[in-house]
Structures are given as structure tokens and as C-alpha cells.
Amino acid sequence: MESVQRTARGAIGRRLARPEAWILAAVGICWALAIGLVLAGRSDLISHDAIIEDGNLPILVAIPIFLVIWQLMTGAMMLPSILPVIRIYGRITAASPRRVAWLASFIGAYFVIWSAFAGLALASDSAIHFTVDRWPWLAAHEELISGALLIGAGIFQLTPLKERCLTECRNPLQFVWRRYAPGVRGAWRLGIANGIYCLGCCWALMLVMFGVGVGSVTLMAALGGVMVLEKTWRGGARLVPLVSAGLIGLGSVAILVPGWIASLPPLP
């Protein structure tokens, strides 16, 4: 009996020693928290509009809350897409006594890239709100903003930059092999590079998420699933133009049929 228990404990220990197991656990926690907010009737906390634009919180309080929620989104939507890189990096660093610190540095650098994007997106969103509030015509035609965002994201799907970044992300072994360096600093540089290419693949889709207020777990799951499939699925290359056509189509309808988006029932 004891030998069976030791074998079971050993198997569990080996599984937990794999960094991807911890990452999957972190992803699960992020999704559980996001779903919990919806079930508790506090989905407004996932929306930057509710926190910053429409809320009553001081800006110095609202921005840190927004950044915390953004980390939750990044963990839920983006971490699954870099699991192949984490798995390979974990195997390469398996013999290092400081592999946990190296992995933490890698993940931290990755989150820094996406946090910087969040800051730029928030500044851009604030500038748009500022313009709309002072331009009555644009305030009466807000569908142009939503439509342009969707069409722009759809067009970006077909650009060489998108394809270049996807090529890097779809070849994790080659990506890590060319850039690997031991140590916390080497892990940080690898995480920065991975974050930049990941951002290059997905920034437009994340901007779509940002543009609708980041208040829907359903939309988070849909866009997160698209990004994971584009980067890790063998048929991901075939998915890219389909997503492009869908976004351009939705954007065109949003512009040609004013009020259509506003008439849609809110997604949970």
C-alpha cells in the first residue's frame, strides 16, 4: 500500500514539476475569478468603461484596479496561447536549480509587454471619449467608431506583420532555440521577445475586446479561443482569413445599420 502511495505521490510531483501544469492552474484560476464576478453580478469590474469612464472612483484608484483586471484578462486569454513555449522552456531548464525564478522572470516579462499595451489602449480610449464628448456629430454616430475598429482588426488579420508574428509563435522550438540564454536576465529577454511577437499577433483582436468594454466573459472566451487556435492549431492559418471576413462583415453592418450593435442583447 505504501509503495502505491509513493508511486502516486511521485507521479503527482512529476506532473506539478512541469511548468505547464502550474500555468494551466493559473489560467483556471483567472477564468474562475472572471466567471465568479459575472455570477456575483459584478461583471462591471471587468469593464474599463465601468471602472474609469462611468464609475465614481478617483482616477488614482480606478487605474490600479483596471491594471489588476487586465492581468486577469491576460492570464485567462493569453497564457493558454504560449503553453508550447513554456513547455519547451521548462524542458530546457529542467536541470537548473533556479528554474522557478527563470520561469517567473519569463512570465513577468510577458505580462509587462501586455501591460504596456493596456496603458496605450487606455490612453487611446480616453482620447476617443474626449473627442466624442466634444464633437456632437461623432457622438450621434458612435457606430462609426465600433465599425472602424472591427474593420481595422479584420484588415490587420491579412497583413504581413500578422503573418510574421504568427510564424514565430507557431514554431516555439525554433523560437526558444534561437533566443535562449540561461539566467534570470536571459529568461526576461526571452519573455520580452515572446510578448512582442504575441502582441504582434493578437493586439487587434484584444483591441476589439477592449473596445467593447471588456465586460463579457463570453466574448473573452471567444476571442481567447480564436487567438489560441491561430497560434497553436495546425489549421490556424486557414482560420485567419475567416476571422478577417467575419470582423470586416460585422464592422460593415455596424456602420451601414446604425444602432445595430446597441440593439444586441448584452453577452454575459
Image (cartoon, rainbow, N blue to C red):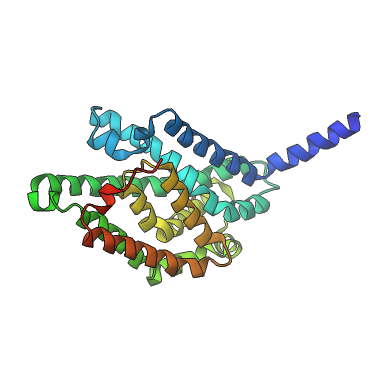
Q: Find residue 219 and report its horizontal and vertical position in percent.
A: 41, 48
Q: Can I make out residue 155 in this image?
A: yes
Up-down relation of residue 257 to residue 133 (above or below): below
Q: Which quadrant would residue 122 be assigned to in this image?
A: top left
Q: Find residue 189 and report its horizontal and vertical position in percent.
A: 49, 53
> 227 or 164, which is in the foreground?
227
Up-down relation of residue 187 to residue 171 (above or below): above
Up-down relation of residue 97 to residue 224 (above or below): above
Q: Find residue 103 and report its horizontal and vertical position in percent.
A: 57, 45
The quadrant of the rendering that contains the N terminus is top right
> 85 or 139, which is in the foreground?
139
Please indicate whether residue 4 sits to the left or right of residue 40 in the image: right
Up-down relation of residue 223 to residue 48 (above or below): below
Q: Can I make out residue 109 in this image?
A: no
- The residue sitting at 45% across, 65% down in the picture is 165
Q: Find residue 77 and report its horizontal and vertical position in percent.
A: 47, 47
- The residue sitting at 46% across, 51% down in the picture is 222
Please indicate whether residue 237 sits to the left or right of residue 25 in the image: left
Q: Which quadrant would residue 111 be assigned to in this image?
A: top left
- The residue sitting at 14% across, 48% down in the picture is 132
Please indicate whether residue 168 sits to the left or right of residue 9 in the image: left
